[in-house]
Image (tube, helix red, strand yellow):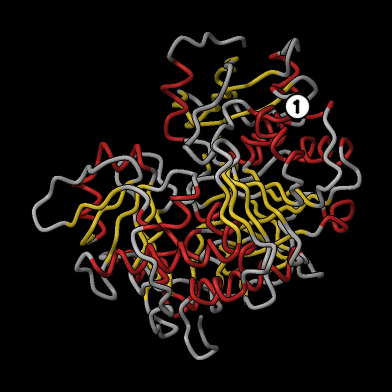
Amino acid sequence: MTNSSNWNFAGRLVARLGPNSQLIDAATRRTLAAADLQRSIAGFGASLLSSGLKQGDHVLLGCNLSVSGAVAYLGTMYAGLVAVPVDERTLATSAGKLITATGARAVWTETGCVSDCDGVIDLQGDLANASSLIAPPASCEPCDLAALMATSGSTGIPRFVMVSHENLIANTEAVIRSQHLGADERAMLVLPLSYCFGASLLHSHLYKGGSVVLDRRFMFPDKVLRSVAEFACTTFAGVPTVYNVLLRRSNLRKMDFPNLRRFLQAGGALASERIDEMRATFPGVGFYVMYGQTEATARISCLAPNSWEKKHGSVGRPLDNLTVSIVDEEGNALGPEEIGELLVKGPSICGGYWNDPEESSRVFGNGWLHTGDLARQDPDGYLWIEGRKGAFLKVRGTRVSLAEIEGRVAALPGVFECGACATDHHEAGDALMLMVVAEPEARIDAEEIRRSLPAHWTVDSIRLVSELPKTATGKLVRSSLLDWARNGHAAIG
């Protein structure tokens, strides 16, 4: 259904579906086998074009974690249109703003029309069956836009990253190599398709000829775990929040997953103690720690399971088609173990932000992605993320990383998670406010926490909270910590 000279990513993916490939909705049991999946993707694309859209038009997709949502996302790219996946609930409340922000010519939702905007085509329902035409994928060049992916902003309308067909092909193929995926893989996907990590899992497993199980019921984690076992999943992927929930609020330790081969973790740092728990609970399952950004299509580096003992805390080596550089504030390259901003170059680095040339020039300058992350690279080539530019405070003239503080506190007995932020202090300038989530039935000793930190890191208060403010994809919303802490959470020390 495609040829090697056509760079259409979805077309290449469809051509690589294996005889046993399936897309499965765990909640509804709806299943599309390989031939039906090919027809559905091609049919959805044909239906979009028959509505009056032309190649290159942007289509805003209200993507639930469902078979229809996945088909819509892939079918849009198959037709040579630009997929703009967003959460359907967000689309329902912010359609006009999203249309303006993305230049969308059409809006598709699984459950109903929401745009109500002049000149915008409204589409709804399962369009995969609206056309039986098995057409070849649209002809695309490497630099043609395939998707606009939202950055993981915590509030407001996010920026949208321009992802090309070449970006998707390059990153997907590198991810497959880094995880040693085979054609018999079956992934459990609980992450949104509008999130680059979730989309990457869909891409890699189908592109390799495997299968994907979609389960949107993670608010009931045991249901998802039963699906992992029932559907013989070989891969499970999650952000730190997902693994924290599994370790605290599920029957993970009482269940058996004989087919599981790998856990994948990205989307922020998961405490080493939690990774050790996962590894000890499932010693025969590889735990892959990964690092990435939407601006790099998805993945930037991967720490293989056999490197954990020697390199725990690292995010691994860069993917094999990427080049990295650590630079100082003047842009000068730094040597091994020196901390500076991480820059990345390669075929999966995206073309910039849609309709934002100023920010694109700043972040994607001179062909390099300026990640905004502070990192070091050891002599063996492994990357270590040391913090985020701006995620620091100055205590008595000393620059302190909030990420380092959180990691130290989270490693203490009885502490499950920690969020740190700065608050004004009459002597120190900045002082620390710590929000601590305790292990079940654990007693938190505020003085023990204070003693674990250097004396000059002035701690203003420590507050016990039941959870930390997180984005929909599980990332800490640091800007909300002060309000969160002061809203009914008394200080314990």
Mark 1 residue element: helix
Residue 227's image quarter? top right
Q: Is residue 419 left or right of residue 429?
A: right
Q: Is residue 249 left or right of residue 253?
A: left
What residue do we see at 46% from left, 78% from top?
8
- Above or below, comparing residue 162 to residue 411 in the picture: below
Q: Is residue 147 visible?
A: no
Residue 194 drawn at (x, y percent):
44, 51
* Residue closest to the eye, 217 or 444: 217
Residue 214 drawn at (x, y percent):
58, 45
What residue do we see at 43% from left, 30% from top?
480
Quadrant where the C terminus sits is top right
State the residue position of label 1: 452
What residue do we see at 64% from left, 71% from top?
334
Residue 240 drawn at (x, y percent):
64, 39
What residue do we see at 77% from left, 46% from top?
232
Q: Is residue 23 left or right of residue 383?
A: left
* Residue closest to the eye, 391 or 437: 437
The extreme left residue here reads 118
Q: Amino acid at mark 1?
A: Ser
The extreme front residue here reads 132
* Residue closest to the eye, 72 or 253: 72
Residue 92 drawn at (x, y percent):
27, 38
- Above or below, comparing residue 15 to residue 192 in the picture: below
Mark 1, Cα crowd under 10 Å, few <14 / some 14-19 / many 20+, is: few
* Residue closest to the eye, 457 or 357: 357
